[in-house]
């Protein structure tokens, strides 16, 4: 007679593909490191309330980000670098549409066709991008989490913003996995010990298994 497989907890191993080179196409449903440059006067509001999508742009409305930190450092335009800050982000891209030519039929309407993010590859010869650098546009700002300050000339401001980020993450993070939980995590009881577990936890050592092994020794 066949026996079922007993499952008692797990241990997770980190996926090394969260960072992409500029010319690598993002995989739908994955999370990646990206950057966003903004004015120091807007930095605290972004940390506290999240990003406010642009009403329009080369890829239409949305939040513009890039894997290229040098591109992020250029924003906002016509601003002294002492008044700029570049945020390091974690972006859950969802369903991605590649926009790689001028007058692409979905250039500004991708979000109306079931896509969560638009991606412009580097050197795509799109006339609007003079630098040729990679660019992304995210429709829903809730898909973006600020994780650190990547660049800020003012040391005092940089550490102040980092403290805000840590406090915000601690407040909004899942109590079990300690990760961003803005969309909620699917908390379920363990099949064996009934302890609440989150699928994003690094590991779960099942109490029921430990207790039973101890009692049979």
Image: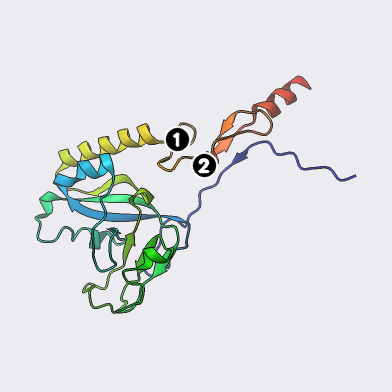
Considering the numbered disc 1 on the image, is that residue within a helix, a strand or a loop?
A: loop
Instruction: Return the residue nearer the eye: 195 or 8.
Output: 195
Q: Residue furthest top?
A: 215
Q: Residue furthest right?
A: 1
Instruction: Return the residue nearer the eye: 13 or 65.
Output: 65
What is the spatial separation of the Cα atoms under label 2 and label 1, in whole angstroms?
Answer: 9 Å
Residue 193 position in % (x across, y down): 66, 28
15 horizontally vs 119: left or right: right
Instruction: Return the residue nearer the eye: 99 or 13.
Output: 99
Considering the numbered disc 2 on the image, is that residue within a helix, a strand or a loop?
A: loop
- Above or below 187: residue 136: below
In the rendered structure, are the residues bearing label 2 and label 1 in contact, judged by CB atoms less than 8 Å apart? Answer: yes
Numbered mark located on residue 129 in the image? none
Task: Name the residue tied to disc 2.
Answer: 200
For the point 52% across and 42% down, which residue is it?
200
Q: How many marks?
A: 2
Residue 112 position in % (x across, y down): 38, 64
Q: Quadrant of the N terminus?
A: top right
Task: Name the residue tied to disc 1.
Answer: 174
- Above or below 6: residue 69: below
Badge 2 density bin: few <14, some 14–19, many ≥20, Cα 10 Å: some
Residue 13 position in % (x across, y down): 54, 47
For the point 49% across and 40% down, which residue is it?
185
Q: Earlier in the sequence, mark 2 or mark 1?
A: 1
**Viewer can see residue 185:** yes
Badge 1 density bin: few <14, some 14–19, many ≥20, Cα 10 Å: some
């Amino acid at each position: 007679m066949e026996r079922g497989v007993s499952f008692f907890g797990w241990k997770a191993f980190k996926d090394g593909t969260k960072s992409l080179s500029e010319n690598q196409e993002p995989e739908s449903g994955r999370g990646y490191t990206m950057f966003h440059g903004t004015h120091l006067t807007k930095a605290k509001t972004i940390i506290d309330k999240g990003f406010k999508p642009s009403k329009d742009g080369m890829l239409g409305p949305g939040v513009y980000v890039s894997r290229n930190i040098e591109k992020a450092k250029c924003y906002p335009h016509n601003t002294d670098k002492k008044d700029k800050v570049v945020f390091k982000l974690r972006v859950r891209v969802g369903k991605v549409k590649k926009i790689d030519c001028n007058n692409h039929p979905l250039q500004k309407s991708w979000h109306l066709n079931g896509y969560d993010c638009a991606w412009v590859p580097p050197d795509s010869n799109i006339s609007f991008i003079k630098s040729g650098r990679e660019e992304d546009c995210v429709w829903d700002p809730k898909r973006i989490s600020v994780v650190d300050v990547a660049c800020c000339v003012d040391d005092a401001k940089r550490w102040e913003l980092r403290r805000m980020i840590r406090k915000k993450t601690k407040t909004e993070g899942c109590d079990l996995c300690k990760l961003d939980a803005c969309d909620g995590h699917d908390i379920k009881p363990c099949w064996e010990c009934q302890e609440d577990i989150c699928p994003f936890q690094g590991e779960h050592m099942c109490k029921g298994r430990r207790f039973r092994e101890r009692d049979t020794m």
